[in-house]
Amino acid sequence: MSILYLIFVNIFSWLLILFGVGLPIFFILKAIGLTGFREVTRYENYHTFYYQLHPLTKIAFGVVAMIISATTIWWFGAVITAAVALSYLSLRGGRRKFNLAVYLTLTTVVGVTWGYAPFTPYSILTQALGTAHFSTLWTWPSYFSYMGYEPHLTLQSIIYGLQISMRFTAISLTSLILVMTSTPSDILRSLNKFGVPVSLIFSVVVAMRTIPRIFDAIDTSIKIQLMRGLGSGAPRVLMPFYYLEAAITSIVPVFVYILRGARDTAISADTRAFRAYDRRTSVRPRPFTRSDYYSVAVMIALITFSAIAIIAGYGRAIPYVA
């Protein structure tokens, strides 16, 4: 084996690792960006179907999507992911939200697939895919075994990783629908009526209000650092590293900013007499509407169909190819 070939194998192997790690980072930093994360974690008032649903209905929808994705064959999760992503078109700024849903899905698929494919033992692949014959796509250098890599990257391991990723995509998209289409107050009232402890509900609501502010503060901090000359005159290819540097150095000021905001949140809760009584009261209670009942009927149908599919053999704890 020539030295040139060994050099090529090592370089290409590390390029594969950089691809698996770098592509999700590219989607996060470039395609989605801090602005995109702020948009998908913040409520905006609108009038379409999702905004009219009761928060408990949307929570139930997320739970149903999780159950179906976790217990049925992988392409059930893929179908739900595609349907939910298309439904983002009905949200405020639908095309932008749909694009963000696509990028988030691609980030999850690539990240999860690459997190499983090189490390999955062949015995698991045999059990999951029902075959002992693997198609080798690449052979890693021997020292990669110290990092937990299997000797060969196979087509079956990539298929297995793709199937695993379908367990996560539908859950993440349905969870974001609740955040984007429900006010924190509506969620607080709904969960309180459902019997969830108020302290836990308050923590969730504070998190919903804080996460968009974190993304907004980091974005502002990065822009200020760039305006002050960070990376000025540097080649364009090096700008992502300066963005990363700006993001890291923004952690402390953003942390201080959020802590100061926590004081305002505490004052706001005290002035509104939060926890003054065991039960909360509402001036305008949020009733269940006809849309909620239709949605519940659809969820029952989905669960029934999934149960039939599992009985028919289309469901296992470990994904497999039908």
Image (cartoon, rainbow, N blue to C red):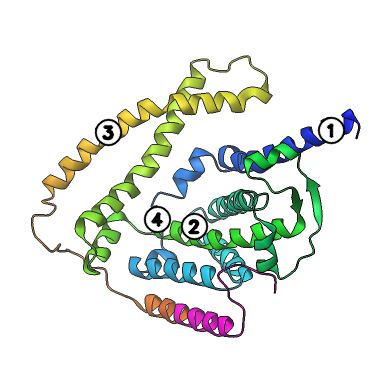
Distance between mark 2 and mark 4 Cα atoms: 11 Å
Kindly identify which numbered label has been placed on residue 259: 3
Q: Is residue 188 above or below residue 14?
A: below
Q: Position of residue 54 (x, y in %)?
A: 34, 69
Mark 4, secondary structure of its residue: helix
Is there a contact, CB below 8 Å, between mark 4 and mark 3?
no
Mark 1, secondary structure of its residue: helix
The amino acid at mark 2 is Ser
Q: Which of 216/279 is in front? A: 279
Distance between mark 2 and mark 3 Cα atoms: 28 Å
User: At 73% from the left edge and 40% from the top edge, which residue is drawn?
Assistant: 16
Q: Position of residue 315 (x, y in %)?
A: 58, 76
Please check the rendered image and state whether residue 247 is part of the magenta-colored stretch, yes or no: no
Q: Is residue 98 above or below residue 279?
A: above
Counting residues from the start of the chain, the first of labels 2 and 4 encountered is: 2
- Residue under label 4, please give it: 179
Distance between mark 1 and mark 3 Cα atoms: 53 Å
The amino acid at mark 4 is Val
Q: Nearer the viewer, mark 4 or mark 3?
A: 3
On the question of residue 222 being in view, the answer is no
Q: Nearer the viewer, mark 1 or mark 2?
A: 1
- Residue under label 1, please give it: 6
Q: Position of residue 30 (x, y in %)?
A: 60, 38
